């Protein structure tokens, strides 16, 4: 895959980075990434991934844009209110980078369709707003053996980590048990907080594609916008985990 002159220019500032280079940029171009949700987190992660030259982005969201989204879901604009988020987001991403093939689908991601939706994407970026959906992503990640980059936000705070099947804990190891939401819904969110978390998710996604070390694997990074601090927690695999460990049954992987 040769780059066009336009692509060479477009990506020149990241091709300069030794860990990227032309070879890395080719890997980015060949990559297929699944972004689950195009709200506060997905607006930002998908935007940076498209800008970076990810060859194929698959974005899935069930909702329409409404006025309460606009303080943080920056891919959607005032004129998009009432439009499907998948369409609004897909249009912006294609306009940002016509080299990026964007597949934008309106769907609710469930246990029965997730594996099919993820398809042959090489990694999952979590941009959902509920634990039930995240558990579905986690199960698909384990089933397919592909990385799952978790992100979540609340008020001015957020958390992010990268789950790599067979190497790190999975979501269930860290947040075991139920679909109970940690916060009342809908949670208050200051717009830039998901921006911070989603930027880290996008960096992780690109590093995974490039095969770079230093991932947030086995480390849960917690951000507080209240005092602008990052704290890191070591997270461990639960050998009895119901999804990735001995507690797993065929049912729990559906
Ligand atoms: Zn697990």
Image (tube, rainbow, N blue to C red):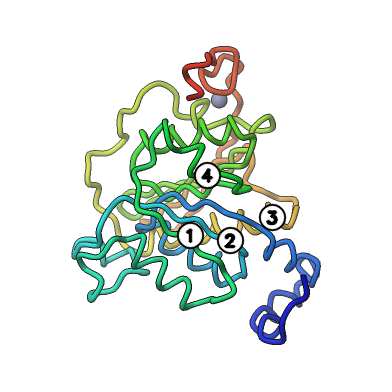
Q: Residue at x 53, y 16 (%)?
A: 250
Label 2–label 3 contact, CB within 8 A = no
Task: State which tag comes first along the sequence, 4 or 3.
Answer: 4
Task: State which tag comes first along the sequence, 1 or 2.
Answer: 2
Where 144 sits versus 177, above or below?
Answer: below
Residue 142 falls left or right of residue 184: right
The picture places residue 39, in percent across and down from the top left corner, at 35, 57
Residue 150 falls left or right of residue 206: left
Task: Give the labeled residue for mark 2.
Answer: 56
Structural distance between the alpha carbons of marks 4 and 3: 16 Å
- In which quadrant of the rendered view does residue 132 lie? top left
- In which quadrant of the rendered view does residue 133 lie? top left
Task: Give the labeled residue for mark 3.
Answer: 209
For label 2, the crowd category at 10 Å Cα-Cα, with few meaning under 14, some 14 to 19 and many 20 or more, is many
Structural distance between the alpha carbons of marks 2 and 3: 13 Å
- Say which of 110 and 244 sits in front: 110
Q: Residue at x 75, y 51 (%)?
A: 213
Structural distance between the alpha carbons of marks 2 and 4: 12 Å
The residue at label 4 has a CB less than 8 Å from ligand 1: no
Task: State which tag comes first along the sequence, 2 or 3.
Answer: 2
For label 4, the crowd category at 10 Å Cα-Cα, with few meaning under 14, some 14 to 19 and many 20 or more, is many
């Amino acid at each position: 895959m040769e780059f066009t002159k336009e692509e060479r220019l477009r990506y020149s500032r990241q091709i300069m980075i030794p860990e990227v280079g032309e070879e890395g940029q080719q890997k980015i171009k060949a990559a297929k990434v699944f972004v689950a949700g195009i709200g506060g987190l997905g607006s930002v992660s998908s935007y940076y991934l498209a800008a970076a030259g990810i060859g194929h982005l698959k974005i899935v969201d069930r909702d329409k844009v409404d006025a309460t989204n606009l303080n943080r879901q920056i891919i959607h604009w005032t004129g998009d209110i009432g439009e499907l988020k998948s369409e609004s987001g897909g249009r912006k991403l294609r306009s940002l980078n016509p080299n990026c093939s964007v597949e934008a689908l309106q769907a609710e991601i469930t246990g029965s369709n997730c594996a099919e939706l993820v398809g042959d994407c090489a990694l999952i970026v979590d941009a959902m707003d509920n634990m039930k959906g995240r558990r579905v992503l986690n199960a698909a990640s384990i089933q397919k053996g592909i990385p799952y980059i978790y992100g979540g936000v609340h008020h001015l705070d957020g958390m992010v980590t990268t789950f790599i099947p067979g190497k790190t804990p999975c979501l269930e190891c860290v947040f075991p048990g139920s679909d109970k939401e940690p916060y009342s819904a809908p949670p208050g969110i200051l717009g830039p907080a998901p921006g911070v978390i989603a930027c880290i998710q996008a960096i992780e996604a690109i590093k995974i594609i490039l095969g770079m070390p230093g991932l947030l694997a086995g480390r849960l990074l917690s951000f507080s916008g209240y005092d602008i601090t990052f704290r890191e927690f070591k997270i461990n695999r639960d050998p009895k985990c119901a999804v990735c460990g001995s507690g797993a049954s065929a049912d729990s992987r559906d």
